[in-house]
Image: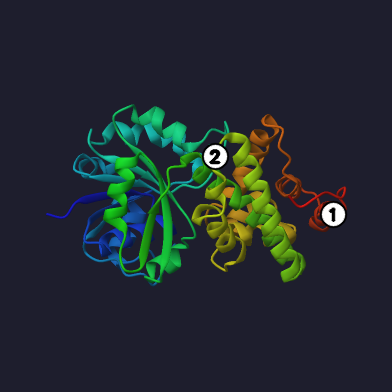
Amino acid sequence: MAEHVVVYGAGSWGTAFALLAANQGLRVTLACRTAMQAKAIGRDGENMRYLAGAALPATVTPVPASEAGAALERAAVVVVALPSRTIVSEATRIAAAMPPDAGLLSLTKGLEPSSGRMLSDVWREALGPRRPYAMLSGPNHAEEVAQRQPSAAVVAGDDALCARLQALFSGDSFRLYTNPDLLGVELCAAAKNVVAIAAGMCDGVGFGDNAKASLITRGLAEMTRLGAAEGAASATFGGLAGMGDLVATCTSRHSRNRRAGELIAQGLAPHQVEQRLGQVAEGLWTVPRLLERAEGHGVELPICAEVAAAVAGKPVLECMGDLMTRAPSAEL
């Protein structure tokens, strides 16, 4: 009998990952936010709101999250694709319902917004010492994964769980690598969304390729500096979770954080941005906590600081001007 996977969160990425798991021959329960959402997905055979055009096979069963308990009891892996701001309230409930031998895979990219904690710390506190934890990251736009376009990702966390996840989810269109540097993978996943907002701000004011390429490169330098200060491996920042995801998030038409930057450049407030997107832009929630972490280590993040200023209402052209007129310095 095929192994059972429960995916919490029926946004675009949660739905795409449920489809990916089903394509690997797994039975999937897709835990939706509301009964109405579950009913609509079941009726339409696809998630019309978040991932229209991606047909879900009969092996994906949408249910309201409040009714996912029975599925959780037989789950081999629990996958969580929820916004960072909901993790604290959901982690204890999900962990308590999981079987003792099930592992948890997080797809959420960001920091815990109220405290700035790593999401792995939140999950490990909820899971306890017995249940293993891992995080998946990389350049994985849901729309392309759902279309079975070639994609690669990295998974970090408990070694045995990572190896198991690699075997379960790797296929002819999705290649999964393991990485022992969970801290680095998490930092990359959080910081790249902030840099992508800056890239979107460039787009929003009409700057060209030179500006964006420079911003991506210097954004990677900021990410790597913070990682080094926190004890992460520098190689992680040049890999799929770092450079790979940064390029995809800063340049793609699918990127919510890049689009958020465009909308900020057009004068929208953060709450208006997410209303327009219809989904969460994690970078908006991450940037103040990322800056707090950097300040605690004495690390300067000028691009991220200007993103925070723009989110707070500073004109985007003024932010860009202040970046360009900073005191001269060496690249390395």
Asked whether the beta carbons under mark 1 and mark 2 sit within 8 Å of each other, the answer is no
Residue 294 sits in quarter: top right
Residue 209 x %, y %: 72, 70
Residue hosting label 2: 232
Left or right: where 65 falls relative to 194: left
Crowd class of label 1 (few under 14; some 14 to 19; many from 20; radius 10 Å):
few
Calculate the distance from the C-alpha at mark 1 to the C-alpha at mark 2.
33 Å
Pick the residue in front: 157 or 207.
157
Residue hosting label 1: 318
Residue 162 x %, y %: 34, 46
What secondary structure is found at the residue carrying circle 1?
A: helix
Crowd class of label 2 (few under 14; some 14 to 19; many from 20; radius 10 Å):
many
What secondary structure is found at the residue carrying circle 2?
A: loop
Look at the picture and state if 38 lies above or below 119.
below
* Residue kind at label 2, given as amino acid type: Ala
Q: State whether residue 172 appears in this view.
A: yes
Q: Earlier in the sequence, mark 1 or mark 2?
A: 2
**Residue at 77% over, 68% down:** 207
Residue 234 x %, y %: 57, 46
**Residue at 40% over, 65% down:** 145
Left or right: where 300 falls relative to 281: right
Question: Which label is found at residue 116?
Answer: none
Pick the residue in front: 325 or 224.
224
* Residue kind at label 1, given as amino acid type: Glu
Residue 225 x %, y %: 66, 43
Q: Residue furthest left?
A: 1
